[in-house]
Amino acid sequence: MCGGGVFSLRVINALNPLSQHYTKDADGLCTRLIKPKLMEGTVAAQDEFSRSGWALNRKELKLLQTIGKGEFGDVMVGDYRGNKVAVKCIKNDATAQAFIAEASVMTQLRHNNLVQLLGVIVEERGSLYIVTEYMAKGSLVDYLRSRGRTVLGGDCLLKFSLDVCEAMEYLENNNFVHRDLAARNVLVSDDNIAKVSDFGLTKEASSIQDTGKLPVKWTSPEAIREKRFSTKSDVWSYGILLWEIYSFGRVPYPRIPLKEVVPRVEKGYKMDAPDGCPPVVYDLMKQCWTLDSVVRPSFHMLRDKLQHIRAKELYL
Ligand code: AMP
């Protein structure tokens, strides 16, 4: 189990023990509680965020305009004490629980290639705001598609690959599994630094019941079949992300119907190199797609190789 999962569960499990007690036994109440009220989870989280110093003041946050739609709610650009920030807003108490998990995970992580959490606002009515650094150039996949090969040279592509690899090496060292690594979940800053974001899927492996919701084309065979998520399943996804970078944001496995992807991959099928992809980089992709997860390289090894490719200009 990853460290992040432990922490997020701790917050969710801060669900008032009293409410848990009264779900089993009315114990003097006029009725047994049928379901613990979700609000209690949010209130507990609010205390936790205040205690740990992550709570921000709602009065100091100005929400300016909507810039994206996430799985759980709108993403807005805002102003916090004169700084441009991104804000994930959620008004529904039930989904707020999932957000709390995401924010809790983010409080533990700090790296130049991870989108930085600035703070959290939990309102009494259950609205929740996750405030992060603002990434002016949006998602990497949109960035690659809109600029294309006429604008982005091999040095840029390799730099994005290294940025993401460094973030993932940091997660690897901290025994933390992302589970949803893909170019859509990498954001680009004003100064062209790629940063990994979207920790929405970072749950305990056992809590991912619905494999139908997994991003099949990015998920390793053992994670799809047996829900075996690990740093090595992130390495598989990283190989797909490399393919996305070098194909300027194409959707992986072009021309293969979605339901045929997993059976073909399990028989050893691997995507071809994107047009113009340096053979040394394609070689890394193929290593990431080794069926036996144990044999896949670590992010540490991948970063080392990418740095070598950069230093020797093998990408030209
Ligand atoms: P998400 O819910 O994280 O998948 O975000 C949905 C979309 O909102 C992304 O694809 C981005 O276009 C935008 N977005 C999310 N976070 C940020 C951010 N920190 N800075 C700028 N745009 C963001």
Image (cartoon, rainbow, N blue to C red):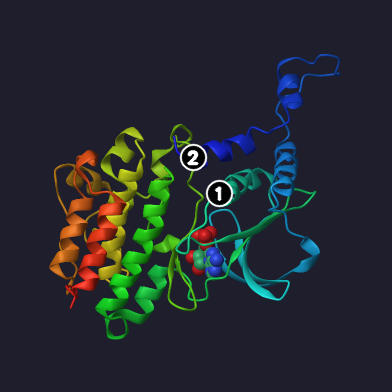
Residue 235 is left or right of residue 56, and the answer is left
Residue 178 percent across, percent down from the top left: 43, 48
Quarter of the image with the N terminus in it: top left
Residue 247 vs residue 8, the one in the foreground: 8
**Residue flagged by tag 2: what amino acid is it?**
Gly
Mark 2 vs 1: CB contact within 8 A: yes
Is residue 14 depicted above or below 300 in this figure? above
**Residue flagged by tag 1: what amino acid is it?**
Gln
Is residue 75 visible to the viewer in this orientation of the structure? yes
Check disc 1 and report the residue beneath it: 108
Is residue 185 depicted above or below 156 in this figure? above
Of the two numbered discs 2 and 1 on the same chain, state the one appearing first in sequence.
2
Quarter of the image with the C terminus in it: bottom left
Which numbered dot is residue 3?
2
Residue 214 percent across, percent down from the top left: 39, 46
Q: Residue at x 37, y 60 (%)?
A: 166
Residue 83 percent across, percent down from the top left: 67, 74
Q: CA distance from mark 2 to mark 1?
A: 9 Å
Q: Residue furthest bottom?
A: 150
Locate residue 23: give its quadrant. Answer: top right
Residue 196 percent across, percent down from the top left: 44, 60
Residue 187 is left or right of residue 272, and the answer is right
Is residue 248 visible to the viewer in this orientation of the structure? no
Is residue 253 depicted above or below 64 in this figure? above
In this rendering, the count of numbered labels is 2
